Amino acid sequence: MTKLGIGVAGCGSTGIQSVCQHTVFPDECDLVYTAAVMDPVPGRAKYVAEKFNVPHYYTSYEELLADPTVDIVTLASPIGVHFEQGMAAIHAGKHVHFNKTMTVSTEEATIMIEEAKKYNVKLVSSPGQMTSPALRRMRKAILTGEIGIPSWTIGGSEGVLLWHCWQPNRDLGEGMPKIDPTWYFKQPAGGPIWDCTVYALHAMTGIYGPAKRVTALSGQRYHDYEFDGKHIDSEVDDSTQMILDFGDAFFGVVYTSLKGDFGNHNGFSTITFGTEGRIMDGKIVGRNGEVQLYDPQNLDLKFIRDNMGMPHLNDHQVRLGESHIFEDINQLADWILNDIPPYGTVEHARHVIEIIEAAYKSAETGHVVDLHTTFEPLPLERL
């Protein structure tokens, strides 16, 4: 069987977790293998290549793109360079996987989508949230009226910036410098919305379809962080509340906060209330009775396999960190090799980017901001 070579741009925590550790044993992957890794930090790419049995390593992105064994480039680099690196990969004839988010502007996303069509390359962006059977089941419940008329929904993320300061996988050991998370705290591409609230936004819009308008309040509660004895002066908002208008008086609340635990958000999902039921705590309770989607107290391998949606991964890979991202990359490979469309479409990713841009604009101006992009949510037959 043909396998596609992955070129990993960035040997930080995401690049290692989402690709290299999954392909260290070549016979575990049917569609892909890691062909090359690249990182500008001296010694890091070499270290990662040797540790994970990767044939080639580079310190420059240009060398990675010139490698003929690289078919797919996965951008595990800071979000602020995704546009520049994505365009370069497209022009080199490489298919591209974007770790969230695809870009930091709707305009950049549109340019890349159009450019990819000209060069006949395929793009996929994480997070492909609708890969999850649980989220697809939620969408089916909405489309079939299982909880009546949806009243409102809420989802979000918390504690993201603090998490990056003590993430254990930032310590590579063996004399290597720790993976510095400073860029997460700097403008224009840092902050928890671009990094983690994208999961809730992809889930909510995946279930309910494109939003029409956004209003938001946003600000910075905490300014000083520390990583490995180093002070980090944060520039990014860490407290944001958005209201998404889906039309017909149905609204969604999306948040990010320093800390908190509102309900149950396994997989950065959503809580929804309707006129005849609700979706929360891992279950649908509607007019047709109760449907248990998952047990919030038992998030074991069976939960991941059955509800997160990773059909291309074996049991060992499912247990590993960032396995959902590796699944998105495999879906890109399946699309290239077998013409099977992925769940993580760039049109959906672009719409989420516009929502984030609109939220910041609304918070700055005090006005509701109209949205102009759209995407095709999953039809009933794919659920």
Image: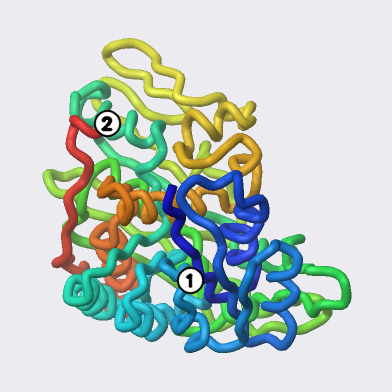
Up-down relation of residue 9 to residue 243 (above or below): below
Residue on which the image places disc 2: 383
Residue 148 occupies which quadrant of the picture? top left
Which circle marks residue 69 in the picture? Answer: 1
**The C terminus - image quarter:** top left
Regarding residue 12, the answer to whether it shows in the image is yes
Horizontal and vertical percent position of residue 200: 41, 51
- Residue at 26% over, 29% down: 140
Horizontal and vertical percent position of residue 307: 47, 32
* Left or right of residue 382, residue 5 in this image: right
Up-down relation of residue 59 to residue 361 (above or below): below
| Tag 2: amino acid | Leu
Residue extending farthest front:
1
Looking at the rendered structure, the secondary structure element under dot 2 is loop
Horizontal and vertical percent position of residue 231: 75, 84
- Residue at 32% over, 68% down: 353
Nearer-the-camera pick, 14 or 58: 58
Looking at the rendered structure, the secondary structure element under dot 1 is loop
Up-down relation of residue 319 to residue 280 (above or below): below
Residue 20 occupies which quadrant of the picture? bottom right
Horizontal and vertical percent position of residue 214: 25, 62
N-terminal-most mark, 1 or 2:
1
Residue extending farthest right:
175
Query: What's the distance in space between the residues labelled 1 and 2, CA to CA?
Result: 36 Å
Regarding residue 252, the answer to whether it shows in the image is no
Nearer-the-camera pick, 185 or 379: 379
